[in-house]
Image (tube, rainbow, N blue to C red):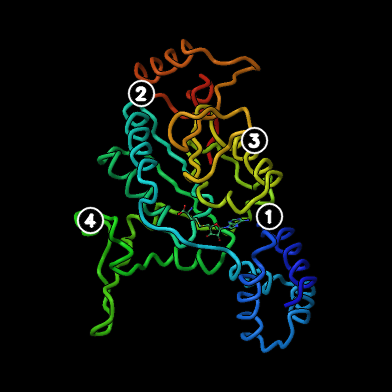
Amino acid sequence: MDRRTFNDFRGLIYDLSGISLSENKETLVSCRVNKRMRALDIKSADDYLNYVQDDDNSSEIVHLLDAISTNVTHFFRESGHFDFLKAKVSDWASNGQRRLRIWSAASSSGEEPYSIAISVLEALRGKNVDVKILATDISTRMLKIAEEGIYEGKTLEKVTAAHREKYFTRIKTPHGAPRKYRAKPLLRNMIVFERLNLSQPPFPMHGPFDIIFCRNVMIYFDKEVKSRLLADMYRLLRSDGYLMVGHAESLTGLISDFKIVGPSVYEKDLILHGTRKTQKARVERTQIQQARPDLSQTQRSASGCYSART
Ligand SMILES: C[S@@+](CC[C@H](N)C(=O)[O-])C[C@H]1O[C@@H](n2cnc3c(N)ncnc32)[C@H](O)[C@@H]1O
């Protein structure tokens, strides 16, 4: 692939996905594009570029983005986030919260949303809470794997034996093939998988989410795409909701409305009617919840504790 064609692909990929490929990614792009050219029996990169540009139903665009994106992930990656999640969910449930909405914004092959589901169930210890996890990714290939929820035994290394037993079923594999496990319906039914391009906000969800996991994807975006994305995530979070980002990602210099409260954990800053909510308001709210745990959803909305949820 020559330099001009590489730059055309770079521009196209940026426009389609926000993924910002540096100049030294020529070999990577060339290898991945070659794979698609072989699959389609197209002989030159320029012809393939034209093919993608003329792709009216976007099916080849999806394949190209699938080929370009990096999908590395694993169960309980950056495990501190899951300890934080468990602590929050347990607090909220003890304070009477009965709905929980979590978004795994670049869910790849599903290890992240399933880790979230396991953590939430463990934190709730049987408490009756309506939990929904939205898992989105740009890659339809990854979403398909995630939705099936089938993983090889070695992929489940970070899942304890007890949790593997509780939340996965071993499935039949040919003699000598690696062991495979499928997430039980209990986990799968908590998660809705959807294709969503993070570079194109505003997103169609209503929110608010209690927690958003947007980890190890912003590293591929430039400042402009990141800022747009963060602004819409801010909108979709409840006030005092949390945003988790990858440990290699920092929001420094990007937004002022989140405050850092832990390693790669950001809290939506408490802004109410244009003024910062005081600690007192937060305490009062907790007291209302504790005193009236049976408040209906409408009452909670009216009291300012909650608003309409996804
Ligand atoms: C490295 S994985 C991160 C997976 C998981 N969040 C984690 O931290 O383990 C990055 C994921 O971001 C997805 N991705 C890349 N660009 C995207 C975009 N514009 N919109 C949505 N997802 C995107 C890729 O398809 C890939 O599955």
Instruction: Name which of mark 2 and mark 4 comes first in the sequence.
Output: 4
Q: Are marks 1 and 4 in contact (CB under 8 Å)?
A: no
Q: Nearer the viewer, mark 3 or mark 1?
A: 3
Q: Nearer the viewer, mark 1 or mark 2?
A: 1
Q: What's under tag 1, amino acid-wise?
A: Gly
Residue 166, disc: 4
Residue at mark 1: C-beta within 8 A of ligand 1: yes
Residue 293, disc: 2
Q: Residues within 10 Å of mark 2 (few under 14, many from 20)?
A: some
Q: According to the image, label 1 marks what residue?
A: 18
Q: What's under tag 4, amino acid-wise?
A: Lys
Instruction: Name which of mark 4 and mark 3 comes first in the sequence.
Output: 4
Q: Quadrant of ligand 1?
A: bottom right
What SS does tag 3 mark?
Answer: loop
Tell me the quarter of the image containing the N terminus. Answer: bottom right
Residue at mark 4: C-beta within 8 A of ligand 1: no
